[in-house]
Amino acid sequence: MVILTVGLNHTTAPVEIRERLHIPDAQLPAVLERLGQEATVLERLVLSTCNRVEVYAVTPDPDKAQAVIPQLLAEGTQTPLALFQDRLYHHHQEEAVRHAFRVAASLDSMVIGESQILHQVKAAYQVAQAQGATGPILNTLMTRALGVAKKVRTETGIGESPVSVPSAAIGLAKSIFGELKDRRVLILGAGEMAELAARHLQSEEVQVVLVAHRNFDRAVEVAARLQGRAVRFDQIRDELRQADIVVSSTAAPHYLLHRADVEELIRLRRNRPLFLIDIAVPRDIDPEVNQIDNVYLYDIDDLEGVVASHRQDREREAAQAELLIEREVASFQRWLKSLEVVPTIVTLRRRLEEIREMELEKALSRLQDLGPAQQEVVRTLAHGIINKILHHPTTELKRQSVNRDGLLYVSALRRLFGLQDEDR
């Protein structure tokens, strides 16, 4: 049996193709059922996200399965095969295992270390399981992939450093204030980035979000989306006295806040810290304000620099994660090898013969009056019993090995006789 992965992702196909092949959650059971109608696809799982569409399969005929799966994807999504065939990658056996582990651990993601993919892999596995589409191999592969992903997140720092401008800003704000709960946030302007930053801050349970814009109707519109409060632009100086965090993103061609303004402001605030995030270009806030005690100003270049530094941190952690994954791939390969019929029969016979020799030695030590000929009779008897015991399971295992259930027989036999320990 061969583990096969057929798919495409953000590195091999543009979004125009990925969106055509995307399979909504509601349609996954039908696609899994159609794949299951192919005799060459014994187990299957479909992972469809905004960045990838992949089919994981267990097959006795990888060449045929590799040809059939793209055709079924084309049929299921009503997308011409010629549009995406050249974008597909194919991974077999060990490479497919490594790919599954890297995907679940987010090493194959557009943003290394992002956590969403782990939930998406888990959801895809649950759908396939509920459909009865997985068997002993994919069940073990996915269980281990999810375990590897969790181990990567706990044993490396791959997900610790934020790699987006809004999340980097929140990290800086926390370094100043500690917890952000109940902090007061003022948004100047209504740009997309400012709104995104506000949403990130809301996830930290900030107390209130105020939105000021020269067009008050626009301020009301954005404030409604953020469940905040609109402020008239000529009132922002009053609000600045109360705010802890200010996100500025206006289209003004000049500074809105000068050093003298902020010096007066910080005096009125009795030196209470003020965190200013200026993501406007041209900038809204005079960089000289950074010279004032208890004022912390970061512009878009500062934040991009933080993000770039964090990306480097993640890449360093990714190298550690790759080493961890290689160990897990080797472990999985040993388990997979154990599912082959012949090694299982050899291992079972060796285990029973070890037991036979051990028990014979005990028995013969208590039967010291037996002569050599009589001892040989006892040895032959024991050997014959072992052969009789092994005959039917061995024959049945070989007969079932050509069927999907053969894997279940092998797996059950190894568990019943405690042979798993020899795979480690």
Image (cartoon, rainbow, N blue to C red):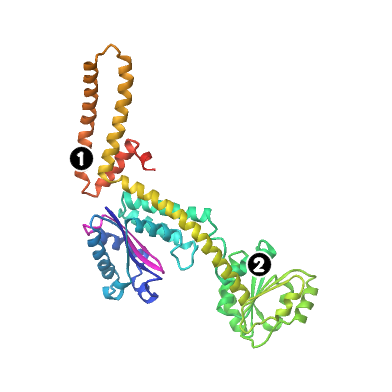
Q: Residue at x 28, y 30 (%)?
A: 353
| Number of numbered labels in the structure image | 2
In the rendered structure, which disc, 1 or 2, sits on the residue that comes first in sequence? 2
Question: Are the residues tagged 1 and 2 within 8 Å (C-beta)?
Answer: no
Outermost residue toward the front? 372
Residue 358 magenta-drawn?
A: no
Amino acid marked by disc 1: Glu
User: In this picture, is 335 found above or below 26?
Assistant: above
| CA neighbours of label 2 inside 10 A, class few (<14), some (14 to 19), many (20+) | many
Badge 2 element: helix
Q: Is residue 312 left or right of residue 288?
A: left
Q: Which mark is in front, 1 or 2?
A: 1
Q: Which residue is mark 2?
A: 173
Q: Residue at x 21, y 23 (%)?
A: 380
Question: Residue 356, image x and y in percent?
Answer: 29, 27
What span is in magenta? Answer: 37-56
Nearer-the-camera pick, 93 or 238: 93
Q: Residue at x 22, y 38 (%)?
A: 394
The numbered mark at residue 396 is: 1
The quadrant where residue 311 appears: bottom right
Question: Residue 309, image x and y in percent?
Answer: 58, 68
Amino acid marked by disc 2: Ala
Badge 1 element: helix
The quadrant where residue 122 appears: bottom left
| CA neighbours of label 1 inside 10 A, class few (<14), some (14 to 19), many (20+) | few
Q: Is residue 39 left or right of residue 207?
A: left
The quadrant where residue 296 appears: bottom right
